[in-house]
Amino acid sequence: MFGKRGPDTPAKAPMPAAALAPAPARPAAPAPVAAPVAAAAPAPARRAPEPPPASATAAKPRSDSYYETKSKVFAALIDTIDLSQLARLETEAAREEIRDIVNDIIAIKNFAMTIAEQESLLADICNDVLGYGPLEPLLARDDIADIMVNGARQTFIEVAGKVHEAGVRFRDNQQLLNICQRIVSQVGRRVDESSPICDARLPDGSRVNVIAPPLAIDGTVLTIRKFKKDKLTLDQLVNFGAISPEGAEILQIIGRVRCNIVISGGTGSGKTTLLNCLTRYIDEDERIITCEDSAELQLQQPHVVRLETRPPNIEGEGEITMRDLVKNCLRMRPERIIVGEVRGPEVFDLLQAMNTGHDGSMGTIHSNSPRECLNRIESMIAMGGFSLPSRTVKEIITGSIDVIVQAARLRDGSRRITHITEVLGMEGDVITTQDLFVYDILGEDTRGRLMGRHRSTGVGRPAFWDRARYYGEEQRLARALDAAEVKGGTGA
């Protein structure tokens, strides 16, 4: 059989530990950071995995005897298979080859297993060798928003806004760390004792954060913010009750007429999803440059340049910060600059870009209200070491930002767009704003879900009216505002 060693076949070369998770009976030192993980096993590109068996996604945890049997089969597989030949196969062919060998091992060693347990074991071992191990069944599910691994024996998932414990675990902390190294190495990053914190992404754009020992006391902690395979649209957000139809129409117009937008919200409130939705209404002939810590935005326009920050290397050199990227954008003839997340002094460069001809630029920021968003921008500019008077900073903010869109995750797990707010100008030393739409919580139903409505505040002529007229959207804007005022909001 292909891949097996016969009696005349020379012994295979030793395999780096990071390529395959070692069994407990066969401990191995962690692979060097610089070693490419994919050298010994096919790179686990984000493929459409075969549907996992029911046992793979069941909430019921497996028994210790199952993991003991799996360790023995895995050790026998590593002794049997020729990994150098396996690496040359396509993913599906390699999967079939592994399945054949594992079936032979089970038959030869006479393990007492049911058909369902054997299928589960086959899927698990294939995932260990070719993919992300126990994470594969969770990554295959489109209803999971977050995967939170707290060490080898505890994994939580978020489904429909609620966090539940998943019935999966890793063989040991070393297997978990190996899988984390496999993930981050695909985007040229590393995680180990000397660099225990790492931000990365999966090939589909899902955001990954890893923090390893010694910082994580109970074992490596892995957090994955999953993206749905089918990207959400504003129409779908309307169906979910995240925004009213009239509010969605206003957001489309705001994106179309090149207002400078800041999307504000807490962690997990849907800022990046909303940013992806708004970018769908950018004209296709515009040159867009995105700057992100981990590239996760997926724009549909044909003329998009994607930039990503770079952490320092093992000598502490070569770091490229978000501010470096935003400053470089200004030399690349952008028409719109989109910053995935503003966390520090790069906010000043983004504001300067918004105020110097790059209309329609966008960014996200962590804050709990539009007013707090403005305060945070002031604070980040001050932390960047800019010695500017407070009034000057506020004038730069009001001259740069047109609209703040506030997203929130409510206590029942639902996500809502709670404010669409214009930044008007200055009155004395205070930045003035006006809300176009707000979300009011009205009560709670018998299932504990919050009930509310989006309502128009009655503003009939927004500050961006002249901009809408310049782009020929004033009639559409007037209809949307009139419809919102007549309906008085919609129930969520």
Image (cartoon, rainbow, N blue to C red):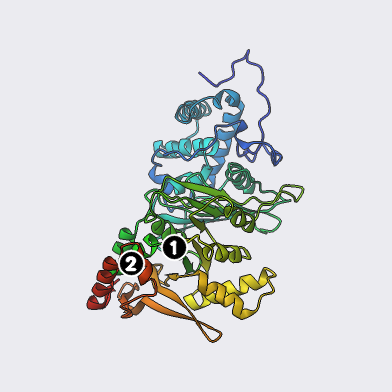
Establish if 50 lies above or below 265: above
Q: Is residue 5 above or below residue 394?
A: above
**Left or right: 19 as drawn, with respect to 100:** right
Q: Is residue 79 above or below residue 172?
A: above
Nearer to me, 23 or 385? 385
What secondary structure is marked by label 2?
A: helix
Question: Of 26 and 225, which appears nearest the observer?
Answer: 225
Vertical arrangement, residue 1 with respect to residue 280, above or below: above
Circle 2: residue type: Arg
Give the residue at mark 2.
469
For the residue pair 145 and 329, the one nearer the viewer reads as 329
**Residue carrying label 1:** 270
Q: Residues within 10 Å of mark 2 (few under 14, many from 20)?
A: some
Marks 1 and 2, Cα distance to the nearest angstrom? Answer: 30 Å
Marks 1,2: beta carbons within 8 A: no
Give the residue at x 44% y 40%. Answer: 120
Q: Earlier in the sequence, mark 1 or mark 2?
A: 1
Q: Nearer the viewer, mark 1 or mark 2?
A: 2
Residue 454 position in % (x across, y down):
32, 74
Left or right: 251 with respect to 105? left
Label 1: state its secondary structure. Answer: loop
Label 1 Cα crowd, 10 Å radius (few <14 / some 14-19 / many 20+)? many
Pinpoint residue 210: horizontal percent, then vertical percent: 61, 53
Q: Mark 1 belongs to which amino acid?
A: Gly
